[in-house]
């Protein structure tokens, strides 16, 4: 059993964390939710930095915590990345990395050299922390967490302290981690963009509880608990760039369900990307539309319908090939079209955000 079984009940005055989760043993799981929803508290419980009155944590068949057992933080095979990397100012970057390593039993999978390579910090090793940018320091912080050879990497809003430019610089490295690490990463974030780009799974936290948990695409497409990833309800699709139309500066992205045209962001053909499609940008029709400014039209089938926040609106889940899209319709147009589960529809997608 490679999964992470995590059950915690933590009572503080004014706040209770109460979760019972089965987290995947691979990929990036985002703990997502508003400020104060309990994301960091959950991460700290996993790290053993908080001791829940009632808790059970099992990974790979090993009990880290239950009624009888308690593995202290330093004996848990974890790497922990904080919002800001606190590096020893008197040590070089290499010295900082080695210091972290000395304190571990080194049984892990990612060695120091691999961590340096993965985070692209080979040219910084002789420098002192105060000569590095915030983004570079954070990359060192992540490498330090990996160099101890953790079996789980815990990251608490690793980009929160960085400005937009630094965030953009560091995201490709996080994507490399996502692609190349074979240990689970638990990633706390309240940034929809980070979640959409990096997460494979999502745990949506609210008031100390996990209100939804599962694979990213599926969980975002739930209509019973629509999760707003930013401005609106929507889905994230895994796709590949299939074609560039240089004349019109457009790129075609292919996903399990069809193809969509989006603005060209100079992403090469063949590259794996993610695209975000918001419910408000999806409309439904019964027939192939004639002349339309909307370039993207897919064949789909209504899967389910649910109420939206406003009484005049509905959310409609549409199966498009192997993928799910969510459309927002007015109740009136849904009634006129006879929208109901099983109805074949033409799905028009007005706008698609491409995330490299
Ligand atoms: N040691 C503590 N003692 C008492 N209450 C605490 C303690 N630590 C956190 N809390 C409270 O628990 C709640 C959840 O905090 P937590 O830091 O887990 O939220 P979060 O979702 O990570 O928020 P943010 O996104 O702002 O970091 C908050 O109301 C916080 O004030």
Image (cartoon, grey):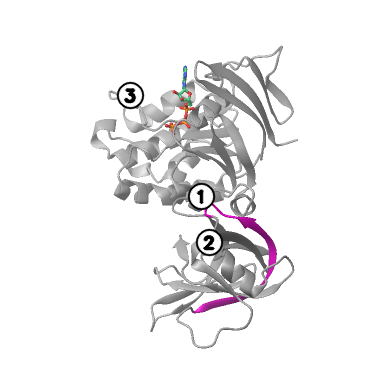
Span colored in magenta: 295-310
In the drawing, does residue 339 fall left or right of residue 190? right
Dot 2, how many residues are within 10 Å of its Cα: few (below 14), some (14-19), or many (20+)? many
Residue at 31% x, 48% y is 164
| Total labels drawn | 3
The percent coordinates of residue 343 (x first, y second) are 71, 72
- Residue 13 against residue 223 in the figure, above or below: above
Q: Earlier in the sequence, mark 3 or mark 1?
A: 3
Comparing labels 3 and 2, the label whose residue is closer to the camera: 2
| Disc 2 secondary structure class | helix
In the drawing, does residue 243 fall left or right of residue 4? left
Q: On the image, numbered disc 3 is attached to which residue?
A: 88
Which image quadrant for residue 181? top right
The percent coordinates of residue 301 (x first, y second) are 69, 70
**Quadrant assignment for the C terminus:** bottom left
- Residue 75 against residue 288 in the figure, above or below: above
Q: Earlier in the sequence, mark 3 or mark 2?
A: 3
| Disc 3 secondary structure class | loop
Q: Which disc, if any, is residue 228?
A: 1
- Residue 122 against residue 7 in the figure, above or below: below
Given the current orientation, which residue lies at the most extreme left position? 131
Question: Can residue 155 be found in the magenta stretch?
Answer: no
Which image quadrant for residue 247? bottom left
Observer able to see residue 278: no
Q: Measure the alpha-carbon separation of dots 3 and 1.
A: 39 Å
Residue at 51% x, 49% y is 228
Q: Which disc, if any, is residue 279?
A: 2
Question: Can residue 301 be found in the magenta stretch?
Answer: yes
The percent coordinates of residue 26 (x first, y second) are 64, 43
């Amino acid at each position: 059993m490679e999964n992470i079984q995590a059950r915690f009940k933590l009572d503080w005055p004014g706040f209770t964390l109460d979760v019972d989760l089965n987290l995947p043993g691979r990929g990036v799981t985002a703990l997502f939710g508003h400020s104060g929803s309990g994301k960091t508290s959950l991460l700290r419980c996993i790290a053993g930095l908080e001791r829940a009155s009632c808790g059970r944590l099992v990974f790979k068949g090993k009990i880290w915590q239950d009624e009888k057992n308690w593995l202290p933080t330093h004996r848990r095979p974890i790497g922990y990345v904080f919002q800001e990397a606190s590096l020893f100012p008197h040590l070089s970057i290499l010295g900082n990395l080695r210091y972290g390593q000395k304190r571990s039993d080194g049984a892990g999978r990612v060695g120091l050299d691999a961590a340096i390579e993965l985070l692209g910090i080979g040219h910084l090793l002789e420098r002192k922390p105060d000569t590095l940018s915030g983004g570079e320091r954070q990359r060192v912080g992540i490498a330090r967490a990996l160099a101890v050879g953790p079996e789980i990497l815990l990251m608490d809003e690793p980009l929160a302290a960085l400005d937009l430019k630094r965030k953009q610089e560091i995201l490709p490295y996080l994507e490399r981690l996502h692609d190349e690490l074979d240990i689970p990463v638990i990633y706390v974030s309240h940034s929809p963009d980070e979640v959409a780009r990096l997460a494979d799974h999502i745990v949506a936290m609210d008031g100390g509880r996990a209100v939804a948990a599962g694979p990213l695409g599926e969980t975002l497409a739930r209509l019973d608990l629509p999760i707003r990833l930013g401005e609106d309800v929507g889905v994230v699709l895994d796709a590949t760039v299939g074609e560039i139309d240089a004349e019109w500066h457009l790129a075609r992205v292919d996903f399990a369900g069809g193809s969509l045209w989006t603005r060209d962001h100079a992403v090469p053909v063949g590259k794996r990307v993610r695209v975000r499609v918001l419910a408000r940008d999806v409309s439904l029709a019964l027939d192939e539309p004639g002349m339309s400014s909307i370039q993207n039209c897919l064949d789909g089938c209504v899967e389910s319908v649910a109420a939206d926040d406003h009484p005049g609106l509905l959310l409609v889940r549409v199966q498009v090939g192997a993928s799910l899209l969510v459309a927002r319709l007015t109740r009136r147009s849904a009634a006129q079209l006879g929208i109901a589960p099983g109805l074949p529809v033409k799905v028009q997608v007005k706008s698609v955000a491409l995330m490299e």
